[in-house]
Image (cartoon, grey):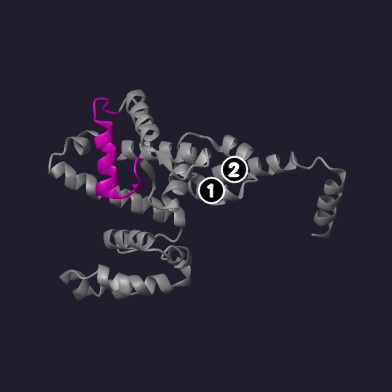
Amino acid sequence: ERFIKNWFRKPRDLETDTATHCWELLQSKDYQAAKELAQTPLLLTLLCVVYDEYQDLPKKRHALYGEALDVMLRKWASEKRIQRDPIYQELSTELELYLLSEIAYTSFTEDQLFFSKPILIEQMREFLVENLNAPGHLDVEKVLKEIEIQQGILVERARDTYSFSHLTFQEYLTAKCIVDNQKIDTLVRSHITDERWREVFLLVAGLLPGKQDADTLLLAMERQTQTYLTNEKLKAVIGWATKVA
């Protein structure tokens, strides 16, 4: 509560009592998912950034993450374009989001929370070369440094060792990469029994457009789980549970 009050201290916020409205919104049962995020300064900052922009908060986590990243990237990008920084003049917000999603998916799939600078640089360079809409002549190391300093999404934890500033970013961007590149079958086949991917599954379900696509995910999960019923005793237990239920 103190953090929120300190965040909204501009004269206009004090006049309209923005901090109180934001705090009261988080107390509502409808915004329980949003309030659960307010456990670290970084995630609470995301809540404040989104509320500052829209004077409201999404009720679902995937929507909150998406809007927070969108506000962060677009605001910083617009400020840099005013200063005519060539990186932000040529690397669009959409392209940067795709780039970060690729990095998140690759590292999360390989169970890497930390990754070396040379590998990160090479991955970014390949993305800029292979993507037809990306400016291939940009200085990749400078792009990385700008993302780190100006946005704080990627952080250098130790010398030449990077990670996402919060696991939440990596999970959300991984889920976005899966949805954007139609990797649902790969996700279900490879990770349905992996507890580490639980949040990614939940975020993917939220990001999939429309009810029918969410149904497709659930049906794929059902088919995959049935492949594990190879033991007769296990089949009997499942049969008994189904009958009792």
With respect to residue 184, does 196 lie above or below? Answer: below
The part of the chain drawn in magenta is 134-160
Q: Nearer the viewer, residue 239 or 110?
A: 110
State the residue at coordinates (42%, 74%): 27
Q: What amino acid does circle 2 point to? A: Leu
The circle drawn on residue 34 is none
State the residue at coordinates (39%, 31%): 123
x and y, in percent, of residue 19 in the image: 29, 72
CB under 8 Å between discs 2 and 1: yes
Q: Is residue 245 left or right of residue 30?
A: right
Q: Earlier in the sequence, mark 2 or mark 1?
A: 1
Residue carrying label 1: 205
Q: What amino acid does circle 1 point to? A: Ala
User: Label 2 crowding class (10 Å Cα cut-off): few <14, some 14-19, many 20+?
Assistant: some
Q: Nearer the viewer, residue 131 or 117?
A: 117
State the residue at coordinates (31%, 63%): 48
Q: Secondary structure at mark 2?
A: helix
Q: Secondary structure at mark 1?
A: helix
x and y, in percent, of residue 169 in the image: 41, 49
State the residue at coordinates (34%, 54%): 68
Residue carrying label 2: 217
User: Label 1 crowding class (10 Å Cα cut-off): few <14, some 14-19, many 20+?
Assistant: many
Q: Is residue 138 magenta?
A: yes
